[in-house]
Amino acid sequence: MFGKAIIPNTLTMLNLVMGCAALLAHDVQDAFIFVLLAAFADLLDGLIARSIGAASEMGKQLDSLADVVSFGVVPAFWLYRLLQPEIKLWAALAFLLAVAAAFRLARFNLDTSDSKGFKGLPVPANGLFWLSVLSLTETQPLSNELHIGLILLFSVLMASTLPLLSFKFSNFSWKENAMKFILIGTILIAAIGSHFILKKVLWTVPIALLLYLILSVVQHLFGKHHEKV
């Protein structure tokens, strides 16, 4: 925790604090802001750790523990609060998101392969998706059936080994990072469209996630086809 590692590890702890704050937030929109801050802290801790040579096993474990809370427990908690008055005990299915997040991160910590991409949906993407959707639909919630269906889908996506794009750049070559650049470009277009057409920039998050999944699958299928050729 001390030495150079104190900088990224402090950011990791900030991620955890923001997750705890999201659990105590007044409403889901405040919770989304805390989760967004947690995501920024989560992004920065890894970048800083690698840039100053302070990456460590302790930091890796702390990062996963913080992510379980901020991006697994938090969306599960807010979904449970929303669903429980109507579907009672069935609302506990929301906590499958927390279980899947814990499983996904434990597998990641034990993974010794040299994969450049992600295996399964990254846990921060789960947290950002749910808090943005819950914020957008606060006054007109989705149906209970759709909520349950999405909970099951996202739990499976996190627990799966579906190959997905990583945003980590080893260089900025177009040939090696084409899909990443395309994804970043389409997300920017989605943000502009969400602001001017949908009138709510928050729609960028679920739209960006959908684009991310589609481009990751395309990258995977194209990569396999290219290898065969």
Image (cartoon, grey):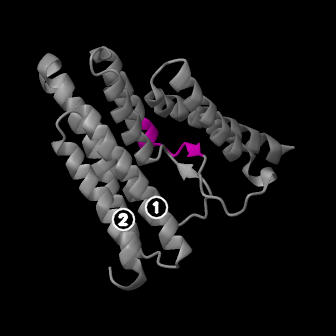
Q: What is the residue that sits farthest to the right in this orientation?
A: 229
Q: Is residue 95 visible?
A: no
Q: Is residue 41 magenta?
A: no
Q: Residue at x 30, y 49 (%)?
A: 70
Q: Secondary structure at mark 2?
A: helix
Q: Residue 74: x and y, percent?
A: 26, 42
Residue 11 circle label: 2
Q: CA distance from mark 2 to mark 1?
A: 7 Å
Please give left or right for residue 108 compared with residue 30 in the image: right
Q: Secondary structure at mark 1?
A: helix
Look at label 2 and name its amino acid: Leu
Q: Residue 181: x and y, percent?
A: 70, 45
Q: Residue 226: x and y, percent?
A: 82, 44
Q: Which residues are magenta?
A: 156-164
Q: Residue at x 87, y 43 (%)?
A: 229
Q: Is residue 162 magenta?
A: yes
Q: Residue at x 57, y 35 (%)?
A: 213
Considering the image in quadrants, where does the N terminus appear?
A: bottom left
Please give left or right for residue 90 compared with residue 50 in the image: left
Please give left or right for residue 228 compared with residue 198 in the image: right
Q: Residue at x 32, y 28 (%)?
A: 135
Q: Is residue 181 above or below residue 50?
A: above
- The image shows a total of numbered marks equal to 2
Q: Residue 147: x and y, percent?
A: 32, 22
* Front-most of residues 45 and 199: 199
Q: Quadrant of residue 106?
A: bottom left
Q: Quadrant of residue 223?
A: top right
Of the image marks 2 and 1, the number of the one nearer the N terminus: 2
Q: Is residue 201 visible?
A: yes
Q: Is residue 12 above or below residue 164?
A: below
Residue 44 circle label: 1
Q: Is residue 126 above or below residue 60?
A: above
